[in-house]
Image (cartoon, coloured by chain):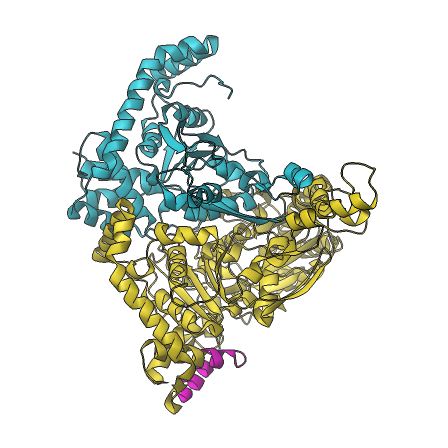
Chain colours: A yellow, B cyan
């Protein structure tokens, strides 16, 4: 029995006493009845008893006949403790190399709980994935070699605000629940009273709920016993197939999970065979995080309400974004394009560059910020090299420089940056044997095989430079609102990936660095809110300023991974050096494109239209940049993360991922 | 222990909201800490550090590295539990409640604890060397510039704060010990915001601004100069005041468990949270606890509307569901519409 587990008994609010959260409780119960479901993911806003539920359940498990232990995986877990390592004490006392079992071994037959599972470091998540998939773990380290069985029920909780879960990891969770706070006065009051009573006298409170608890445990035991013989009725089987098909899930996994979950539900409700009602009861738990949208919702970007306050309590029933209603193809874009014609002369006209003729009648408007959406994953060409930087979450590269903080140690063929502590730890178990072999010598005998190198990380990550078009052409038909929404989405994404961000806007006669590289997207947001729109379009100036910023940064921190995001329709009409504006912009773009220290993306804000000029595409080509339409950026509406997930499955397709 | 002179809490001019938020955590640690936001030079750190002098003594297991409470068997460290199961009594002692500094540059192993290397090499024993979180158990964990804290340190903090337990599973160590602490942080929002998850872990939040009144400004300078010229004398001059406040807080702390809140006030809390659309239930809980602490501080045994009003002002600003990156703050109109105007 581990320490944490024992605390759970009197310090965790009892599972059966918690009001509400029925769906989460059901999911956890089903997973205990049928561990083959693979686990439960609890998603939701802060402070909704996610970890209380998971830990409360853990307190009941030993009684419910759940053989294995409950392992609470701390985010700071080291690879060695997860996998297992040499037992130091045994090695020194007895001179034997014995494995001190890791957490994966301890979790075998039990529950592995990860709070804030979306914050788990990638290499740890990888180990979990491998193990969860194969049911065992291949230990190969420090001279230890073993096949460690490890079948566990994975329970995770997370707050989507902090970033999404990797799709492979998401898939490992058989069931998924979106946990939300109680939204009625009486329910909230009851919860407060319960918590008050628990705080005042935990023992009395736990004792008071004893009967409910015991009844629950008995029911759980009975259901676990019953489960193996529970079958599936034919109508239920049909229902499963149709439900999975309607959700457009990939592979057969959804069907398998649905039948398991329905059978577990039948066992829980003490029915011999799962019927369609059982399938209904569990369908959302299984399908919520697997559902794929058949049609990407194309229509949203345009009709943003001007009300700056987004819907505070998203209704799960809101039909507006449901995939079935998404208007077929281009109708929406069309109507947008036909809206009041912005100054849309053809480029040849513009190219004459009637220079600074009309600065006086600059019309400026400040547009509100459109609603943010979740970006499709932006994939930079992944480099497997150990690069000289990186602690952001976008680019996972470890640093080779001897700067930055130590985050761990590793074995290496050639040691440049000795991790003394890790080296000593590695050498410790072998001391008796080495001393015996050669009695005289230094107090600590270190051999080359003990040497460990530091792994370091620098707090730097990726620098994203947003180069945004704020000229008057962007002011038409609320395009700037939409563009601001896109920029905000980049800011959110940058926050979650811990990128640094800089902000350049161009309009009128030139470009301006509104925000030098910073780790504070809040400041960028405030600037974004106040950013006026108006004037001509000096694209080349914008490109130049953005590039200059990156160059300066690269000079100071050569290891920075730089990404330039150009947001514009490409309709430039201000010459950079008395030439033709478009030609100059393309020339500038081409020059930047030749510098392979940075990568670029062009977000094209030109509406779909018969008269579309496609200039942004040309700029992208010159930049060697990816060219993306603003509407194609969105994975789905950001706020959908908070709703039931009914329509939240992201189409991870074309555009950026391609 | 070195006794660096500390500017007395009671000598801080103005900044009443900040001072109140801090002392509420002494009255009732379950309030869950304070985040103090404000520009430089607003006595944020001074106030936080001065809090140490007001902290009461507590009973702890003598010699325990985690300052375990001998009267709380559910939350003992493995070492104390071993003693208890072996039938040995837990020796008691009175110790001051600690205010532990978490430096922004601290490494993860220093925060969560690590393998005691010396013991490992010399005796071949796997001994756990406690870190900052161990020292902070049952005390206050103070983080200056909390918004500059490294990501993995924040993760470790969140992990520990969630359950009041620190679990270390790394470098051959497998150790779990109690780590219940009141988190007090200061930050300058100009240098970047906090991650929402960490923000939510602070029970209360106060925004401090520079003092505007010229007379008060003069007074601040006067006191600072007096303190710098002769810290001992300055502290002595405020000793009586400090002692009086300490006694008042101790009395309030005694009273808190007796304080009740009736259904009308509880309903007001729930309505407020719903109207403001705050995330989760933590806001409700903190408001209830803070209101109780406020009542106790005023020597009352029941929460009144005014307690609630003040509690809301401290518990809500950082919990508003708002557009991402929007500034921290509460719409006072909504609060007034539900709680009514101040008497």
Number of numbered tags placed on the structure image: 0
Quick check: A515 above or below A113? above
Q: Magenta residues, as a range?
A: A237-257
Estimate the x, y position of residue B252 in percent, counting from the top left: 25, 30
Estimate the x, y position of residue B38 in percent, counting from the top left: 43, 32
For the point 46% across and 67% down, which residue is it?
A67
Image-quadrant location for residue A27: bottom left
Residue A578 part of the magenta-drawn span: no
Q: Main secondary structure of the magenta part?
A: helix
Residue A249 part of the magenta-drawn span: yes
Work out whether residue A198 or residue B296 is closer to the camera in this orientation and state it: A198
Quick check: A41 above or below A597? below
For the point 41% across and 57% down, which residue is it?
A55
Work out whether residue A436 or residue A275 is closer to the camera in this orientation and state it: A436
Work out whether residue A124 or residue B180 is closer to the camera in this orientation and state it: B180
Work out whether residue B234 or residue A318 is closer to the camera in this orientation and state it: B234
For the point 21% across and 29% down, which residue is it?
B298
Estimate the x, y position of residue B171 in percent, counting from the top left: 63, 48
Estimate the x, y position of residue A628 in percent, counting from the top left: 59, 64
Q: Is residue A147 visible?
A: yes
In the shown orientation, is residue A309 left or right of residue A466? Answer: left
Quadrant containing the C terminus of chain A in the rendered view: bottom right
């Amino acid at each position: 029995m581990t320490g944490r587990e024992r605390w759970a008994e009197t310090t965790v609010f009892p599972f059966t006493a918690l009001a509400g959260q029925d769906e989460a409780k059901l999911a956890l119960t089903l997973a205990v009845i049928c561990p083959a479901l693979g686990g439960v993911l609890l998603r939701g806003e802060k402070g909704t008893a996610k970890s209380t539920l998971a830990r409360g359940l853990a307190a009941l498990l030993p009684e419910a006949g759940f053989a294995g232990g409950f392992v609470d995986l701390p985010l700071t877990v080291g690879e060695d403790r997860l996998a297992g390592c040499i037992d130091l004490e045994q090695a020194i006392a007895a001179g034997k190399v014995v494995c001190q079992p890791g957490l994966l071994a301890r979790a075998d037959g039990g529950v592995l709980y990860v709070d804030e599972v979306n914050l788990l470091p990638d290499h740890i998540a990888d180990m979990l994935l491998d193990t969860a998939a194969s049911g065992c773990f291949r230990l190969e380290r420090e001279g230890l070699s073993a096949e460690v069985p490890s079948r566990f029920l994975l329970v995770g909780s997370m707050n989507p605000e902090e970033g999404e879960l990797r799709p492979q990891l998401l898939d490992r969770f058989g069931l998924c629940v979106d946990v939300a706070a109680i939204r009625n006065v009486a329910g909230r009051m009851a919860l407060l009273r319960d918590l008050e009573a628990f705080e005042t006298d935990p023992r009395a409170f736990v004792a008071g709920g004893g009967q409910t608890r015991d009844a629950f445990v008995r029911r759980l035991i009975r259901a676990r016993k019953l489960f193996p013989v529970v079958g599936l009725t034919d109508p239920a089987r049909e229902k499963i197939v149709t439900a999975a098909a309607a959700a457009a899930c990939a592979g057969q996994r959804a069907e398998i999970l649905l039948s398991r979950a329905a059978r577990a539900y039948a066992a829980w409700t003490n029915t011999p065979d799962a019927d369609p009602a059982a399938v209904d009861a569990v369908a959302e738990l299984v399908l919520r995080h697997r559902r794929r949208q058949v049609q990407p919702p194309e229509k949203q970007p345009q009709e943003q309400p001007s009300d700056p306050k987004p819907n505070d309590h998203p209704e799960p029933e809101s039909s507006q974004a449901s995939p079935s209603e998404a208007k077929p193809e281009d109708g929406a874009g069309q109507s947008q394009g036909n809206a009041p014609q912005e100054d849309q002369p053809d480029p040849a006209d513009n190219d004459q560059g009637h220079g600074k003729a009309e600065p006086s009648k600059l019309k400026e408007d400040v547009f509100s910020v459109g609603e943010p959406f979740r970006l499709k994953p932006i994939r930079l060409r992944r480099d497997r090299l150990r690069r000289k930087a990186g602690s952001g979450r976008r680019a996972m590269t470890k640093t080779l420089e001897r700067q930055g903080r130590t985050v761990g140690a590793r074995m290496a063929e050639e040691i440049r940056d000795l991790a003394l502590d890790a080296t000593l730890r590695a050498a410790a178990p072998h001391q008796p044997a080495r001393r015996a072999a050669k009695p005289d010598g230094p107090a600590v005998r270190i051999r080359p095989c003990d040497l460990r190198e530091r792994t370091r990380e620098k707090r730097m990550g990726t620098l994203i430079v947003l180069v945004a078009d704020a000229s008057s052409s962007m002011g038409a038909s609320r395009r700037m609102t939409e563009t601001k929404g896109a920029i905000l989405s980049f800011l959110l994404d940058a926050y979650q990936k811990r990128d640094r961000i800089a902000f350049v806007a161009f309009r009128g006669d030139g470009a301006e660095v509104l925000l030098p590289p910073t780790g504070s997207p809040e400041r960028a947001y405030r600037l974004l809110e106040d950013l006026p729109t108006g004037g001509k379009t000096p694209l080349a100036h914008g490109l130049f300023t953005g590039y200059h910023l990156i160059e300066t940064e690269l000079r100071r921190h050569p290891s920075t991974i730089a990404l330039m995001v150009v947001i514009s329709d490409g309709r430039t009409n201000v010459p950079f050096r008395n030439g033709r504006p478009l030609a100059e912009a393309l020339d500038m773009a081409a020059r930047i494109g030749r510098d392979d220290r940075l990568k670029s993306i062009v977000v094209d804000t030109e509406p779909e239209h018969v008269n579309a000029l496609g200039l942004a595409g040309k700029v992208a080509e010159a930049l060697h940049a990816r060219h993306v339409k603003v509407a194609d950026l969105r994975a789905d509406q950001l706020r959908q993360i908070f709703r039931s997930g009914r329509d939240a499955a992201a189409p991870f397709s074309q555009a950026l991922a391609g | 222990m070195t006794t660096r002179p500390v500017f007395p809490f009671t000598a801080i001019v103005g900044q009443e909201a900040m001072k109140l938020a801090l002392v509420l955590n002494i009255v009732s640690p379950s309030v869950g800490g304070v985040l103090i936001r404000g520009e430089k030079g607003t006595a944020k750190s001074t106030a936080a550090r001065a809090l140490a002098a007001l902290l009461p003594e507590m009973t702890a297991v003598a010699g325990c590295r985690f300052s375990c409470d001998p009267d709380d068997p559910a939350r003992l460290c493995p070492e104390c539990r071993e003693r208890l199961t072996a039938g040995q009594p837990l020796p008691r002692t009175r110790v001051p409640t600690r205010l532990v500094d978490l430096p922004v540059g601290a490494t993860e192993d220093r925060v969560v604890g690590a393998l005691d290397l010396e013991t490992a090499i010399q005796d071949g024993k796997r001994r756990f060397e406690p870190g900052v979180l161990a020292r902070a158990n049952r005390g206050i964990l103070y983080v200056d510039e909390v918004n500059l804290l490294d990501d993995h340190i924040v993760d470790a903090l969140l992990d520990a704060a969630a359950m009041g337990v620190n679990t270390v599973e790394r470098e051959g160590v497998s150790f779990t010990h109690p780590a219940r602490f009141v988190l007090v942080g200061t930050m300058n929002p100009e240098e970047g915001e906090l991650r929402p998850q960490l923000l939510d872990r602070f029970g209360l939040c106060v925004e401090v601004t520079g003092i505007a009144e010229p007379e008060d400004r003069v007074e601040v300078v006067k006191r600072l100069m007096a303190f710098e010229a002769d810290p001992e004398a300055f502290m002595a001059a405020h000793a009586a005041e400090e002692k009086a406040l300490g006694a008042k807080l101790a009395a309030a702390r005694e009273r808190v468990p007796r304080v009740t809140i009736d259904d009308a006030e509880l309903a007001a809390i729930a309505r407020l949270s719903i109207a403001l659309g705050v995330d989760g239930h933590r806001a409700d809980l903190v408001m209830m606890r803070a209101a109780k602490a406020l009542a106790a501080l005023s020597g009352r045994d029941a929460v009144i509307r005014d307690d609630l009003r003040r509690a809301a002002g401290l518990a809500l600003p950082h919990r508003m569901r708002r557009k991402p990156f929007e500034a921290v703050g509460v719409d006072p109109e909504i609060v007034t519409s539900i709680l009514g105007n101040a008497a």
